[in-house]
Amino acid sequence: MRLNVQNETAQLQTVVLGRAESNGADPTIDQTFDAKSYDSVKHNDYPKEEDLIAEMSEFEQVLKKYNVEVLRPTLIENCNQVFSRDVGFVIEDQFFVSNIIPDRLEELQAYREIKKLFKGNKINTLPEEVYVEGGDVILYNDYIFVGTYKQPDFKHFKTGRTNVQFVEYIKQKFPNKKVLDFELKKDDQNPYEGILHLDCTFNPVGNDKAIIYKDGFLFEEEYQQIVAIFGQENLFEVTKEEMYWMNPNVFSISPEVVVSEKNFTRLNNHLENVWNIKVEPINYRNISKMGGLLRCSTMPLIRK
């Protein structure tokens, strides 16, 4: 398998989709490690395993409809394996094994068989001090966008997943790329205020468009960098309520096809009627109650 990912939207050929079987017991409020899960547990609304399995199966069927090769991680009993994006990610022909938070280390072993397929590709294990999860890494051809948090209280937040050391690491790894980092607002308990990953507040679609939540950025000048690259007319601005339900976190099969949650009425109408992008709407609302959505549960390996 020759890995190739240059951006978020080119024709998808091979992807890893997470899995929801044997997801383990529902977490207590102290065991949650993102604001959306905290909110779900607090309101006794944490999703049932059978609903998660059904939603991921629906997603898999849409991917296969477009002749995408779908791989699944090895099942680990009583382990949350829904969000494969954060365990590792591909940039160009290189695979990066994430340094994820200790609560999620068990997930890494589920990808051993998949990594055996990467013969001839470069597999990068990050230095110990470099923290990153794939939801904070967004590719846009010559650009690598990185969500981070540089404030001195970084270690106080469970939602602080990608540090400034990763930004410097990836700049050295890809000296010909334009690496831009964006500080995100952090809150471990209020999902209306805290942003877990960059793809929860910003996500390119089509060839030159993007979905964005302005107030997810700690500094407006960093949001304005994205406006300068894409142009205001090519951005779809989501509301706070839409961000809460994870509207930015859709998934592109190609520049012409986006998989979206069926309840994202305003976004889906805009994608289809204004930007002429076909929407494949599916049920994925229960997944969102765990702090991620469509992009979070995928790990693209090959885009043509």
Image (cartoon, helix red, strand yellow):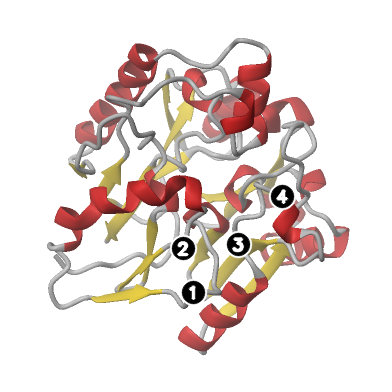
User: Circle 3 is placed at which residue position?
Assistant: 162
User: Circle 2 is placed at which residue position?
Assistant: 99
Mark 3 or mark 2: whose residue is earlier in sequence: 2
Cβ atoms under marks 1 and 2 closer than 8 Å: yes
What amino acid type is highlighted by mark number 2? Asn
What amino acid type is highlighted by mark number 4? Phe
Q: Which numbered mark, 1 or 2, is in the foreground of this view? A: 1
Q: Which numbered mark, 3 or 4, is in the foreground of this view? A: 4
What amino acid type is highlighted by mark number 1? Glu
Mark 4 or mark 2: whose residue is earlier in sequence: 2
Tell me the tag on residue 157: 4
Q: Which residue: 19% across, 57% down?
A: 112
Q: Which numbered mark, 3 or 2, is in the foreground of this view? A: 2
Locate residue 60 relative to residue 151 in the image: left or right.
left
For mark 1, give the secondary structure: loop
Question: Around disc 1, counting alpha carbons within 10 Å, would you say few (fewer than 14), some (14 to 19), or many (20 or more)?
Answer: few
Q: Which residue: 22% across, 41% down?
A: 72
Mark 3 or mark 1: whose residue is earlier in sequence: 1
User: Circle 1 is placed at which residue position?
Assistant: 128
Q: From what the image shows, is residue 259 above or below residue 92? A: above
